[in-house]
Image: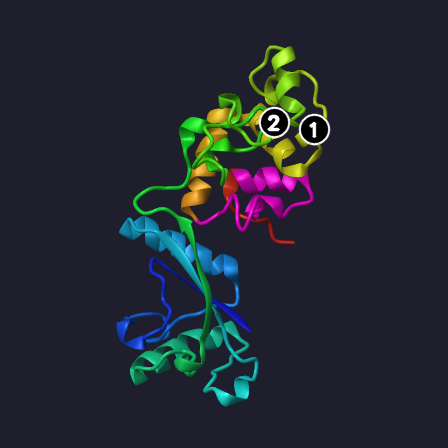
Amino acid sequence: MILFHGTTEIIEKPNVSFSKSYLDFGKGFYLTTYQKQAEKWALRKALRKQKSAIVNVYELSDDLEKYNVLQFRHQCHLDKIKKECKDKGTAFSKCHLEELKTIRSYKLMEKGKDHMKRELGIARCGLACCLCSENATCNGCDSGECPDKDWCENRPCSISKKVEHCYECNEKCRKGLLGKIKPYAFTEFARRYGKDFLLDCLERNEKNGVIYHRDGINGDYDEFDDIETLIEFIRTGSKLEN
């Protein structure tokens, strides 16, 4: 199985001695099978400590019978389990750390600063230049440095109509990148609520662990197939429960 640990350091050899006894399940090296959860832990810790956010990825045998594993199925047992673990000074799940195989580590955020560059704003098509993974070398849509400028349909169209962004246009078309849900939802959000509120929401969401680009150009905002649901996610930072 693949496991993730969100923190601010690259950890090739986990060591329980560095763990704190006041954690939920006592001292231990905490791992999760949910990549996004580890990323949120890493981002929150990085912002608190003003360090880089790093996710360490490990591999462990799927044969859980060889480990001392505590399983529970009911939420009501959680407080009791936490107390028992802390009283015994043991971790919730006590596996053989030497059997953890380190696969890789990756950085989510540079030391001492948020990834978001608010001054880069929103692209003409609605995409967030301020959060783009290319913004380390690109200064935004109108800088002439965007790697997509040669094939982008929305840039020349908006320039010809003398508007700075597609959300300022009277036509609600699906031309170019607006044919995709994310840029169209961002554009519609800015049309309804304004660009500044969109930037405020994106900034807040990033600080709360919402990731714009993960492993390429996809992230948390790309996991929607309904425009209104995505707009609500941008506004609140929370996904609606089905």
Label located before the other in sequence (2 or 1): 2
> Where residue 119 appears, x then y in whole percent?
41, 27
User: Disc 2, disc 1: CB below 8 Å?
Assistant: yes
User: What's under tag 2, amino acid-wise?
Assistant: Cys
Answer with left or right where residue 202 lies relative to residue 167. left
- The residue beneath circle 1 is 176
> Where residue 5 appears, x then y in whole percent?
42, 65
User: What's under tag 1, amino acid-wise?
Assistant: Gly
> Where residue 96 appears, x then y in whole percent?
42, 83
Q: CA–CA distance between discs 2 and 1? A: 8 Å
**Picture residue at 37% right of the left edge, 75% below the top:** 25
Q: How is the image coloured?
A: rainbow
Q: Is residue 16 visible?
A: yes
The magenta region covers 209-234
Residue 14's disc is none
Q: Which residue is at the front of the view, 238 or 207?
A: 207
> Where residue 235 appears, x then y in whole percent?
52, 37
Q: Which residue is at the front of the view, 150 or 153?
A: 150
**Picture residue at 65% right of the left edge, 54% below the top:** 242
Seen as rendered, the residue at the extreme bottom is: 66
Q: Is residue 94 visible?
A: no
- The residue beneath circle 2 is 125
Q: Would residue 31 be counted in the magenta stretch?
A: no
Q: Quadrant of residue 28?
A: bottom left
Secondary structure of the residue carrying tag 2 is loop
Q: Is residue 54 above or below residue 59?
A: above
Q: Quadrant of the N terminus?
A: bottom right
**Picture residue at 33% right of the left edge, 70% below the top:** 23
